[in-house]
Image: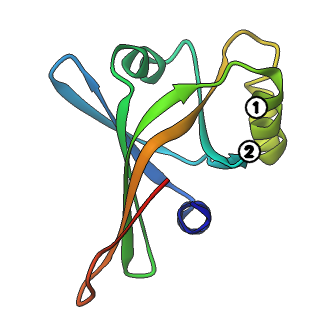
């Protein structure tokens, strides 16, 4: 899991894929946080991403940096605890202009049943589960 976290932090931007009905939806994200031994992402409850995850928690993340890429297939599980939201916002203080732990909009999810695959041209893929 630590290797996944470090890759996503280094990439800075990753792409989150969810589904809306039968239509895949992909958008750039930049938040990843390690809290209580789990990897978290953040969004707002007013966003379509939140509704899509509520309807189908299966998601995939893809990131690319330094000639290598990472794909993480997982289920996203909401953690509505104040501490989880605060940890995310403390890690990304620039988000505090839009989000607050108590605003009723801030939403964090941790990756559950995750399979991460590290790839690079000319190398065999490496898979880890967490």
- In screen coordinates, is 130 left or right of 126? right
- Mark 1, residue position: 84
Residue at x-position 43% and y-position 48%: 114
> Quadrant location of residue 49?
top left
Quarter of the image with the N terminus is bottom right
- Mark 2, residue position: 35
Residue at x-position 45% and y-position 81%: 66
- In screen coordinates, is 37 left or right of 52? right
Between marks 2 and 1, how big is the CA–CA gap?
7 Å
Q: Is residue 70 above or below residue 95?
A: below
- In screen coordinates, is 25 left or right of 80? left
Circle number at residue 95: none
On the image, the x and y values in percent for residue 79 come to 65, 24
Q: Secondary structure at mark 2?
A: strand
How is the structure coloured here? rainbow
Residue at x-position 82% and y-position 42%: 93
Residue at x-position 68% and y-position 48%: 33
On the image, the x and y values in percent for residue 116 come to 40, 59
Circle 2/circle 1 CB separation < 8 Å: yes
Q: Is residue 117 above or below residue 22?
A: below
**Count of all numbered marks drawn on residues in the image:** 2
Q: Secondary structure at mark 1?
A: helix
Name which of mark 2 and mark 1 comes first in the sequence.
Answer: 2
Foreground pick, 44 / 83: 83
Q: Is residue 20 above or below residue 94?
A: above
On the image, the x and y values in percent for residue 53 come to 41, 22
- In screen coordinates, is 5 left or right of 63? right
> Quadrant location of residue 69?
bottom left
Q: Is residue 97 above or below residue 20?
A: below
> Quadrant location of residue 125?
bottom left
On the image, the x and y values in percent for residue 64 come to 40, 67
């Amino acid at each position: 899991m630590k290797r996944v976290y470090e890759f996503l932090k280094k990439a800075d931007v990753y792409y989150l894929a969810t589904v809306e009905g039968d239509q895949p939806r992909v958008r750039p994200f930049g938040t990843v946080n390690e809290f209580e031994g789990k990897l978290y992402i953040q969004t707002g409850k007013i966003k379509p991403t939140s509704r899509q995850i509520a309807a189908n928690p299966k998601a995939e993340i893809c990131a690319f940096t330094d000639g290598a890429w990472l794909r993480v297939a997982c289920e996203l599980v909401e953690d509505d605890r104040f501490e989880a939201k605060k940890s995310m916002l403390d890690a990304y203080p620039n988000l505090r202009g839009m989000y607050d732990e108590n605003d009723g909009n801030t939403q964090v999810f941790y990756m559950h049943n995750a399979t991460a695959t590290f790839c690079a041209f000319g190398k065999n893929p490496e898979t880890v589960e967490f």
